[in-house]
Image (spheres, rainbow, N blue to C red):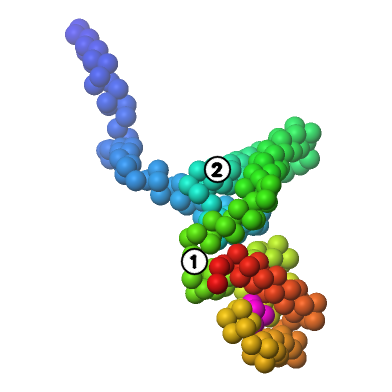
Amino acid sequence: MRTPEAEPPERARDASSVPRNGEAEPRPPIPQRRHPLDGFRYAVEGIVAVVRTQRHMRFHFFSVALVLLMGLLFRLDKREMLVLLFTISLVLIAEMFNSAIEATVDLVTKEYHPKAKFAKDIAAGAVLVATLNAVVVAWVLFMGDLRLEQIRLRMERAEPTLAVAVTIGVILIFVIVSLVKVLATQGKVRLFRGGAVSGHAALGFFFAMAIIVVSGDLLASVLALLLAALIAQSRVDADIHSWREVVLGSLLGVGLGALIFWLTPR
């Protein structure tokens, strides 16, 4: 009696892979090739995500804008601007790593654990070290030995126009007011209505300072200050700001205007 020959291993494996109903098994999907720009896109999505979800990251980005504008206003040279950019980048990188570590720890465990606290504390400490380093560098660049006088002399040689000074002042007020509102409102910011400091009052008194500098006339100066005071009062009467917020905005406008127009040659 003839015995059936054993099937080759390949055929036996193929036959066992076919279901009894005769339908072939679905093949695993072929992995798609990644686009060369996918890595860049994912990186941008990570930056956007950390800015949207992390209040401290929003604070750092506003601080970056403010410091860079001050660097342009104070006419820092190329080397000083590079040092400033490098220092700021360290703070941003440290904050992003801190957010990533916190998210990873929260993904692993939601309960208190000494090692989880240890990891989060170290990450937060790295951000603190980078921030303190940035503060020291900024202080040396902006407020070092006779630094303001050197900046003033440099700006006199560059001879910036009054229009440029006013534009820079308006941008600085917008950045500072936005930064204060971000810190005071847990990131839920209404830039043009309400908040911890009145931007309208700050702009009103800043423009009043500009009129005082340009006109040099006592009557025009008094009228400009009265108009700025009326703007501030209107914000209080409309229950948009309190007197404290209006006074803070007024002091911001006067102080920033005095600094900018003192540095700007006439």
Label pair 2/1, CB-CB below 8 angstroms: no
Can you say which quadrant of the picture contains the C terminus?
bottom right
Label located before the other in sequence (2 or 1)? 2
Locate residue 197: give its quadrant: bottom right
Residue at (27%, 26%) from the top-left corner?
A: 14
Q: Residue at x 27, y 20 (%)?
A: 12
Residue type at mark 1: give it.
Pro
Q: Position of residue 90 (x, y in %)?
A: 58, 41
**Residue 162 placement, left or right of 142:** left
Asked whether residue 21 is in view, the answer is no
What's the amino acid at mark 2? Answer: Val
The residue beneath circle 1 is 160
State how far apart marks 2 and 1 are (Cα).
24 Å
Badge number at residue 12? none
* Numbered disc 2: secondary structure: helix
Where residue 239 sits, quadrant-wise, is bottom right
Q: Is residue 22 visible?
A: yes
x and y percent of residue 115 in the render?
A: 75, 32
| Between 193 and 50, the one nearer to me in the picture | 193
- Badge 1 crowding class, 10 Å Cα cut-off, few under 14, some 14 to 19, many 20 or more, is some
> Percent x, y for residue 130?
65, 41
Q: In which quadrant will I find the N terminus?
A: top left
On the image, numbered disc 2 is attached to which residue? Answer: 83
Q: Measuring 47% from the left and 52% from the top, which residue is drawn there?
A: 45
Residue 76 vs 201, above or below: the answer is above
Secondary structure category for the residue under label 1: loop
Q: Depth check: 11 or 246 in front?
A: 246
| Residue 134 position in % (x across, y down) | 65, 45
Q: Which residues are magenta?
A: 204-209
Residue at the spot 69% in from the left edge and 47% down from the top edge: 145
